[in-house]
Image (cartoon, rainbow, N blue to C red):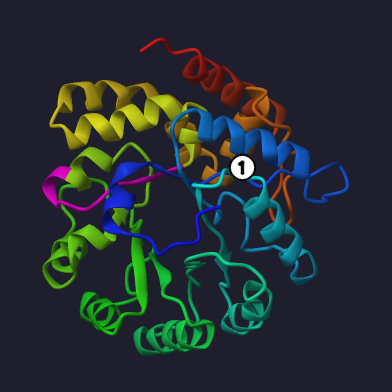
Amino acid sequence: MQTSPVTPEQLNSSVIAVPPLARDAELKINRGENRKIIRHIEAGGISTLLYGGNANFYHIAPSEYAEALEIISTESAENTLIVPSVGPAYGTMMDQITTLRNFNFPTVMILPMQGLTTDTGVATGFRKFVETLGKPAVLYIKFEGYLEPETVAQLVNDGLVSWIKYAIVRDDPAKDHYLSRLVEVVDPRLIVSGIGEQPAITHLTRFQINGFTSGCVCIRPDLSQKMLTAINSGQLDIAETIRKTFQPLENLRNEINPIRVLHEAVASTKIGKTGPTLPLMSSLEPSDAARVEKCAKELSKSDF
C-alpha cells in the first residue's frame, strides 16, 4: 500500500475505484473475497481504491473497523493507494482516529452527513478531525448546501484538504452553478468527479477537474481506465463510446440503488462473493438481481 502523500498527478493517472466490501454469510468481513476484488481491479490497471459508500463504511461497526483497515491495506499491492473513510457522525470520526493511527494511510475520506449540519459546523468538524489526525483528509461534497465553495476554499488554503470528491448529481452536468464557482476558488487539480463514468467527460473537459471515481470500474477496470486515458488525450469520441458501454448498468444503479446494485454486480460476474448486504440496507429482490446480472455480464464481456 502506498504511504506517500497524494498528488494531483496521481489523481489524474488512475480512475479511483470505489469497491464494495465483501462479507460472509454471518456478515463478517471476508478477507479472501476482498482480496479477489482488489486483485481484479489492480489487474485492470487501477492503482487507487477508495472505500466509502459502496463499501458501506457508513454502517461499519467500531469493533470491526481495525480489521477492515488491516485487510484493505495488506491485501493491496505495494504501490496501490488505499483511502478508507470515517464518519459520517462527528463523534464516530473522532473516535476512529485512534484506530487510524495504527496504520499509515496517506489520507482518509470524511463521509458526508446529510441533515443535522451547517456550513460552519461541517467546516469546524473537518478542521478538528484533520488537526487531530495530523494528515489532510478527502472532502466529499455530495449534497447541495453542505459546504459553500468559499468555505471549501478556506479549508484548502489552510492545507487541510488532500483532494475533493465532487458528487452533486445534476440533470445536466454541464449546468452546475456550484461546480462552476468551486473551480473558480479552488485549484481544479484537487477536484475529482465523483459520480462514475456518466458525467466524467463533461466534468473533466468543461470544468477542467482532475479525474473521476467509479463503482462500475470494479466490473471492467481496464475499460474505465481506457476512458480516462481517452479523455486526457482528447479522444472524446472513444471516451463517449466507452461511457455508453457503462450506461446500462449505471442506469440500474440510478433506478434501484447505487450501492446495492454494485454489490450484486460484482458477485454476479464472479469477481468476488460480496455476501449479504450489511444492514441498514438489504439485498436486491430476485427480479432486480436478474436484471443487474444481465447488464453486469454484458459489461464484463464487452470487447471494446
**Quarter of the image where one finds residue 178:** bottom left
Counting from the top left corner in percent of width and height, residue 254 is at 45, 40
Q: Report the span colored magenta.
A: 205-214
- Residue at the location (72% across, 46% down)? 277
186 sits to left or right of 273: left
**Quarter of the image where one finds residue 120:** bottom left
Mark 1 surroundings within 10 Å by alpha-carbon count, few (fewer than 14), some (14 through 19), many (20 or more): many
- Residue at the location (27% across, 52% down)? 9
Q: Which of 68 and 296 is in front in this view?
A: 68
Confirm whether residue 229 shows in the render.
yes
- Residue at the location (67% across, 51% down)? 74
Magenta-drawn stretch, dominant element (helix, strand or loop): loop
232 sits to left or right of 126: left
Give the total number of marks visible in the rendering: 1
Counting from the top left corner in percent of width and height, residue 81 is at 48, 52
Is residue 207 magenta-colored? yes
- Residue at the location (16% across, 62% down)? 177
Say above or below: 106 vs 19.
below
Q: Which of 111 and 76 is in front in this view?
A: 76
Say above or below: 90 vs 183.
below
Counting from the top left corner in percent of width and height, residue 92 is at 64, 79
281 sits to left or right of 255: right
Is residue 287 magenta-colored? no
- Which quadrant of the figure contains the C terminus? top left
Q: Name the residue under label 1.
A: 260
Q: Nearer the viewer, residue 292 or 135?
A: 135
What amino acid is at disc 1? Arg
Counting from the top left corner in percent of width and height, residue 301 is at 50, 12
**Quarter of the image where one finds residue 248:** top left
- Report helix, strand or loop for mark 1: helix
Confirm whether residue 247 shows in the render.
no
